[in-house]
Amino acid sequence: MRFKLIRLAPELRNAKAVWMLKLLKVSAIVLIFGISQFAVVAFAETNFANVNVNENADPSPQPVLLPLVRTQADLQRLSGQRVILWGRYQRQPTPLLDPATGDPPDESLNSVIRPETGIPGFEPGKRPRGFANIVLEDGWAVSISPGNKISLRSPEELETYDNQFVEVVGLVHWWGDAGIVAPSGIDIQQIRLRSLDSKDG
């Protein structure tokens, strides 16, 4: 029996060596997997940190939905607010001519530079500024910046939008009988032509 044990000893040693080799392989695989997972997490954290470098940066601007003014009732209800206003641009009569010169008052003039003509004594022509209203769908006329210097609109605006349906963004006011110049008004920030084919929703 002792002789057999001595003969089995080399086989046991070989089996132990094989087992140790397998254990080393498994340990190496686990180590490599752990390192790779750590690298992935570190890379992700680095990218996240790069994306959020400025924590105080303003968020992406969101579209602002403004209330819509289409009637006098809307105007009264939304007085003092920034709104979208739908109506027809209506040019008012040109300011009265100066009796002494036959020209519009100086504050209503807008010089237009014309090309040189070669004509002696030629002077640039002048187109008058003017007042305008936005007429709502119920017929109520909203004055543009009444009592303010900018109530005199540019010739370009008057010629482009006169008698056209427009969409206006601006601050509306309702004064009613307390209004010195007009009972209501709008301070225009943006104006554009509005197609009547567009949906009213």
Image (tube, helix red, strand yellow):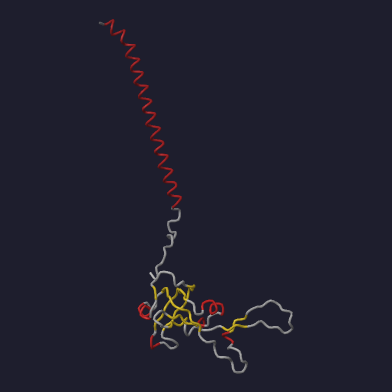
What residue lies at 49% left-to-right and 77% top-to-bottom? 164
User: Where's residue 162, x and y in %?
Assistant: 51, 79
Residue lying furthest front? 197
On the image, the x and y values in percent for residue 8 come to 30, 10
Of 169 and 29, the residue lying toward us: 169
Seen in the picture, residue 98 relative to 76 is either above or below; the reply is below
Image quadrant assignment for residue 71: bottom left
| In the displayed structure image, the side of residue 107 where residue 139 appears, left or right | left
- Residue 174 in the image, given as x and y percentages of width and height: 39, 82
Residue drawn where x is 63% and y is 79% of the image: 112
Question: Residue 7 at x, y = what percent?
Answer: 31, 7
Reply above or below: 6 against 137. Answer: above
Q: Nearer the viewer, residue 154 or 199?
A: 199
Q: Is residue 66 above or below residue 36?
A: below
- Residue farthest bottom in this picture: 100
Picture quadrant of residue 182: bottom left
The quarter of the picture where the C terminus appears is: bottom left
